[in-house]
Amino acid sequence: MKKLILTAFIAFGGMLAAQAQTPDVQPAAAENPNPSELKFVKETHDFGSIPQGTPASYSFEFKNTGKSPLIITTASASCGCTTPEWTKEPINPGKKGTVKATYNAASPGPFTKSITVMSNAKNSTVILYLKGDVKPAEQTKQPN
């Protein structure tokens, strides 16, 4: 048993020695001196009351206030009940684009959902919010 433990320590020590000899230094990425900048008109939209079963959409408008083309790499929702769509082509400085979010409104009650927007901008991550209150669908009366 002592030989097994000793062998394990020697093997572990050998791995550490080998790890210490290989430098794990990567050069820092050059920072863009003229980055793009993502500026939304508003970052939260309140639908107020919406009927259950009726999808609700809102387009968040943004502008590239930087000095390089802006590229949105992804927009992801906090749950499957919200679907984002966004301007896919590069947005030149001074130009506008949109992130459209659709909430399916399947469950009654208040909601707050987020959409995380990732881009090449100086402010590379922006979180947008949709909120509101889904009112239950009215029950239709069955004829007698």
Image (spheres, rainbow, N blue to C red):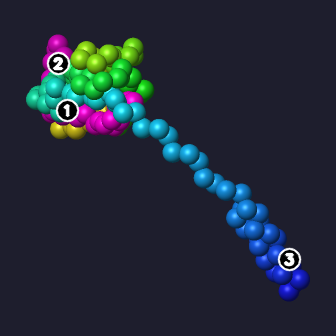
The amino acid type of the residue labelled 2 equals: Thr
Q: What's the residue type where badge 3 is placed?
A: Thr
| Residue 30, image x, y percentages | 47, 38
Residue type marked 1: Glu
Residue 103 visible (yes or no):
no
The residue beneath circle 3 is 7
Residue sitting nearer the eye, 64 or 46: 64
Secondary structure category for the residue under label 2: loop
Res. 50 visible in picture:
yes
Q: Nearer the viewer, mark 3 or mark 2?
A: 3
Q: Is residue 121 magenta?
A: yes
Nearer to us of marks 2 and 1 is: 1
Binning the other alpha carbons within 10 Å of mark 3 as few (below 14), some (14 to 19) or many (20 upward) gives few
Labelled disc at residue 43: 1
On the image, the x and y values in percent for residue 1 come to 86, 84
Looking at the picture, does residue 30 appear above or below residue 38?
A: below
State left or right for residue 43 relative to residue 82: left
Task: Give me the residue at 34% from left, 29% from top.
Answer: 34
Q: CA distance from mark 1 to mark 3?
A: 59 Å
* Mark toward the start of the polypeptide (3 vs 2): 3
Residue beneath the point at 28% across and 19% down: 93
Which structural element holds mark 1?
Answer: loop
User: Which stretch appears magenta?
Assistant: 118-144
Total marks in image:
3
Between residue 72 and residue 94, name the one nearer to us: 94
Task: Kindly state the secondary structure of the residue where label 3 is placed.
Answer: helix
- Using the rendered view, name the quadrant where residue 21 is placed: bottom right
Label annotation for residue 70? none
Mark toward the start of the polypeptide (1 vs 3)? 3
The residue to which callout 2 is attached is 140
Q: CA distance from mark 2 to mark 1?
A: 37 Å
